[in-house]
Image: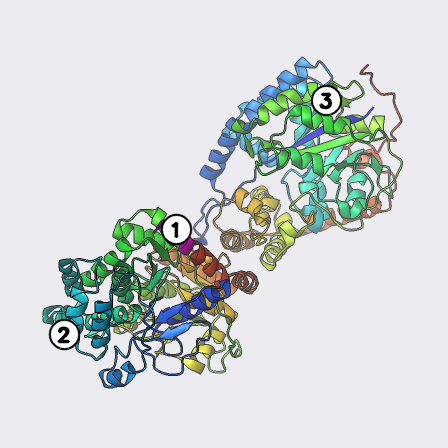
Amino acid sequence: MLGWEYPPHIAGGLGVACEGLTKALARVGLDITFVVPCLMGGESAPHMTLRDPSGVMSKSKRKQRIKKVKIPSALTPYVDDKSFDDLLAAFKYDPDKTSSLLRSSLFPRLNRAEFEKFLASISLTKRAEKLLGAGYGSNVFEQVALYTEKVLELVAEEEFDVIHAHDWMTYPAGVAISKFTGAPLVVHVHSLEYDRSGKTVNTRIHAIEALGIHTASAVCAVSYYTRSIVHQQHHIPLNKVFAVHNGILSKKIKHYPKRMEKWPGKVVLFLGRVTYQKGPDCFVRAAAKVVPYVSDVLFVMAGTGDQLPRMKKLANELGISQNFYFPGFVKGKDLEEALSVADLYIMPSVSEPFGLSALEAVDFDTPALISKQSGAAEVLNHALKFDFWDVDRLADLMINGLIHEEMRTDIIWGAKEELKKLRWDAAAAKVYKIYNLVAVKN
Amino acid sequence: MPSVCLYFQVHQPFRVRKFAYADSCSQLNYFDDLKNKTVCQKVAQKCYLPTNALMLELIKRFAGQFKVAYSISGLAIEQFRLYCPEVINSFRELASTGYVEFIAETYYHSLSSLYDEQEFIAQIDKQVGLMEELFGQRPRTFRNTELIYDDRIGNIVAGLGFRAMITEGADSILQGRSPNYTYRHPNNNMRLLLKNYGYSDDIAFRFSNRAWQHYPLSAEKFASWLHSSNANDQCINLFMDYETFGEHQWDVTGIFDFLNQFPQSILANQQWNFATPDELICWYPGQETISFPHTVSWADLDRDLSAWQGNRMQNKALDNIYALGQHIKATQNDHLLDVWRKLQTSDHFYYMSTKSLSDGAVHAYFSPYESPYDAFIYYMNLLHDFAQQCQRYPTQTSCSTNQLVIEKEYITELNSEEPIPSSNYERFSVNETITEIPLPGNK
């Protein structure tokens, strides 16, 4: 299995999902090797083999880590002796040599021209670097290319029944290993470039996603919603894409009182990046339609993003800035307090593959109002739902959510029961079936 | 000689429109006329008209041996008048055969029996008048909304002069006794007919279920089950929604063929016949009493009130609508009274049920809304507007207080189980003693 991060060192929900899924798959009895770009220390994964291909991310650590890679005792059927010797040589890191080695001898199933093209497609040109935006590191393509090469070196040691790659950064590696070893590829779509950037899709990332999704024997999507987006964006038949809803790992949380001393009234919370895709505009405009009916309400927009200044200005223009609070990015204790205090949690995303935060709000006894364009809307029946563009409807739901305590209580009670059923074991059972399907096929 | 007693419920609610909080004071119509018209006409085409035609044919074919009973809510009649008057004509045709009994209920298919006795009685009164006007029959049997029943409700209904009442043969009440007998209320002379939910649900719910071990169900097979039942049984009471035919079970499931074959399959055994509820209690005036200390209904697997009072939202909505009653009656405004009563229909609260993860599939099937929360929100938005509207009308206090006192005395009288002088409540027949009369021959 190929991933880009693993707890506790995580930038987003991807690492958390990988932890939940692998733990549950291990309970099914699968033997998993999980490769991340770089282990940072502190990871705990006794249920599987967690490894990194000798420090892709950090040049300083690379040579030292190379020594720790175990020399394989058996060869995969696709590598001859000579190639293996070459491979060993390649461990003494030399990027040029490694690349040429991979290009020449280690790819019996991939012709040279194809692989050249493949690597070129994911490595970064100066021009593309300048065009990159949307919060990615400037060298992300380089890292992806490097990860791909190093993972390839690593897998010469082992045999796999299935290659499972999580999100686009690992798709090139997944595709390469699949071609190299002949093992079937399953790609897992946690989010698409379409969901992350909306109007400004990075075409190279989109192309890499297309490569992975089209090469894969099967595709897992984190919701039926994402499944349909995969189908629309990449034009592949729906019968190849399976919806596998994420599970929830129960964790210990600290509850804070529902009311703040500073603000005795009601609190409505928006949490997340303040970008077009998260729908902050709808939130602010709906808030303006709530205030005339429920005056003692505070709207909290927690997070940062390119739309934040515009949202502050909009609240001002609509004459509701006294009902708004912009604390910026919150985490840790502040995050738990915000979720506890809130009477309603609003997720008006334009496109949300899953939306774990809405489920987490339930843990804090806060009912969720979520857009229908989200995966969470599929698993959470006990929530108030609206179309992300429907400002009037969101306002109506917020008004009712605020004035009817009975409804809030009913929603929370039902949602908590639902969350109990949202287990990673259910997700693993589905993934296991998909493995069997593709392993038989190949 | 055991009898099969068929009783069908006909009802259509006035569904409310998707009313936003901000729509307040907009003078919008509360009811979703287009939706109500569409549903009513659809169900008329799929169920009411074809089933009535078949019933008429069966009654004629079996010349007095096949009989049925209906309860048609006042709101269903109102919608037939508006959207498909031919349905009323077809029921009148059935009534004219003389083999159809019309049963009374609350005109507004409401839960008033649980909240407002005075209102409950008024709604029954209105319904009885309607049945008499349309079908020339004064109902002698009563069924409460969704078969909601307990001893207290039985006392009120008996006090109104009804000879029999229909309710659910709930296990929690029967505790091993059979639903296939006529029983008597413990404190008065009213007889109780209990739904045999096993056989009834075979037709109403399981008929087209391919996973059911007895699928497909033929009339012959069903009749053979009944024929082989306990020889001492007096009646098998098959009570269900009329929409079972053609709407819940579509034409393609073969439900109409089943119904077509049903009378002859039952009558193939000459020991068996058909009876209407009123005939049943004449033939078998059961002396055994049965007490309902807690309230039952025919809804969901729980067969209690949880389909309408199962969560906080439902209880809030119910409390709020009935809280308006005193003021609205005091305004003596017919329009307000009519809207208030239409908002009491049990369906509004049924849509708000959040039992949606288990048997809530049934709730979802009937609901015009996406979720129970939507149902609650639209209803409460509308109620908020309605309450404001009501406040704008002055109350005629002196008159209403007087009326209230009279009604209260009347109810006290009912509870004391004294016979009621007919002059006091002339719409209803006097509580007559049921004398055993010989069974009509079917030999």
Residue at (79% x, 43% y) in the render: B154
Around disc 1, counting alpha carbons within 10 Å, would you say few (fewer than 14), some (14 to 19), or many (20 or more)? few
Looking at the rendered structure, the number of numbered marks drawn on it comes to 3
Image mark for residue B151: none
Label 3: which residue?
B266
User: Where residue A348 sits in the image (x, y, percent)?
Assistant: 37, 62
Q: Amino acid at mark 1?
A: Val
User: Where residue A131 sits in the image (x, y, percent)?
Assistant: 14, 68
User: Where residue A257 sits in the image (x, y, percent)?
Assistant: 53, 78
Span colored in magenta: A434-442
Q: Do callouts 3 and 1 point to residues on the same chain? A: no
Relative height, residue A181 to residue B185 (above, below)? below
Label 1: which residue?
A440
Along the line of sight, the residue nearer the viewer: A22 or B82: A22
- Chain ID of residue with mark 3: B
Q: Is residue A438 left or right of residue B199?
A: left
Image mark for residue A96: 2
Q: Do callouts 2 and 3 point to residues on the same chain? A: no
